[in-house]
Image (spheres, rainbow, N blue to C red):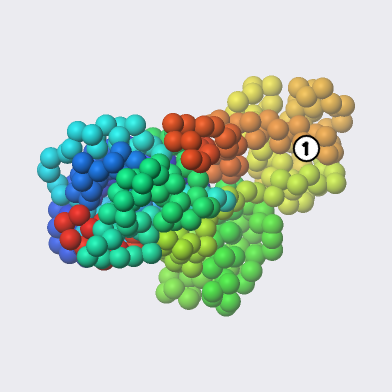
Amino acid sequence: MPTPVLPYVPQQITVHLGAPSEPAENVTVSFPDYIKNVASSEIYPTWEPSAIRANILAIISFALNRVYTEYYPSRGYPFQITSSTAYDQKYIHGRNIFENISQIVDEIFNSYIRQKGFVEPLAAKFCNGTTTTCDGLSQWGSQELAQQGLDSMSILRHYYGDNIELVVNTPVTGIQTSYPGYPLFRGTLGENVVLIQAMLNRISRDYPAIPKIPTPVSGVFDEDTEQAVIQFQKIFNLTPDGIVGNATWYKLVFIHGGVLKLSELVSEGQTFYAVNFQAPERLQEGDRLEGVRLLQYMLSVVGEFNSNIPDVQIDGIYGSGTTQAVLALQQMSGLPQTGAVDKDTWEALYRLYAGITNTVAQYTNLIPEALRPDTGPDTSMTQFPGMQLTLGDTDQRGGNN
């Protein structure tokens, strides 16, 4: 799901103390405090440490899935999760927290599990395993497995399958909204357009009246994108103006999350989106090709961090300003100063651009960060440094089902 493309841990989370549509108070608490509360409400502090850890990772992953998919905001609600086990996880505002649970949460609150190859945190469904059963983790069953000597990740694999991995050191930040804060329309370009195009193309598989946008998507809001937006708006009773404002954006997020089943345990999965940065055969002054706009976009990003590269207007016209920026880039990179873009020049620019997008948060939605395998205290599976459920009533310690 495109909603921030890279998951994060929110500093705070707003909990609705009731079912989604039920009149109830919204409370905002720190994310670790929320996890401690849910874990203290869902499981017993006397359980084996590996069972407690496994349950806490499931609780974290479920909550982060709700945040990542903007599950409730995309439906018009001003909160990220509810306290109702019919929909989410048990949260009892003001309850006492068990000390050993609190310590484990402090250690791992910025870790989560996901399916290999997917971006979104796993919608880690669970239930108590006695009065209620489900396809996900059995809370009492996890305790039995822990007593048999299984570590936490082996327990999680037992219930969620072998194809899961642990992400650690996930960035902690304030609540992010996927909507960029301004409308997108014909002529706009960049990572937000990539997300629109990718969402529309996936949605069109379930709603074939929406015309396909040629792939790989370009990141340029062109006529094809505009027509797909207009048809989407018609289908979902939005003003068919071809402009992606707040209402259209969040309807895209809502429908896209639904067709991919991102908030369900069995998900089609969210993968990274990226602009097609394949090198063109050649670009030079006078060209008005689509690749010129992408060239200018990358030059403008690199130019923000290197004063040697002059400002570039992103207009799709390879004029003298673009030539001067290319000449500066070629001089920096030790390449022949031709002012035209060949494969070597394009690749040199891309390397600079990708280096920036891998380190500067403003641009990380465009290029996925490199994942470097690492090892951690739980040696049952590979851990990855961070890049930046479906449910029913249970008893007091019954989880979600």
- Eyeballing the image, is 89 above or below 324? below
Residue 214 screen position, x and y as percent: 69, 63
Using the image, determine if residue 211 lies above or below residue 53: below
Q: Report whether residue 119 is seen.
A: yes
Q: Is residue 231 above or below residue 93?
A: below
The residue shown at (82%, 22%) is 334
Q: Which amino acid, by three-letter code, is at mark 1? A: Trp
Residue at 32 percent of width and 55 percent of height: 141
Q: 10 Å neighbourhood of mark 1: few (<14), some, or many (≥20)?
A: many
Say left or right for 195 vs 12. Answer: right
Q: Which residue is mark 1?
A: 346
Give 369 or 77, whichever is nearer the viewer: 369
Residue 178, visible in the rendered structure: no
Q: Position of residue 188 (x, y in %)?
A: 58, 51
Residue in the foreground of this view, choosing between 53 and 185: 53
x and y, in percent, of residue 111 in the image: 41, 39
Q: Quadrant of the C terminus?
A: bottom left
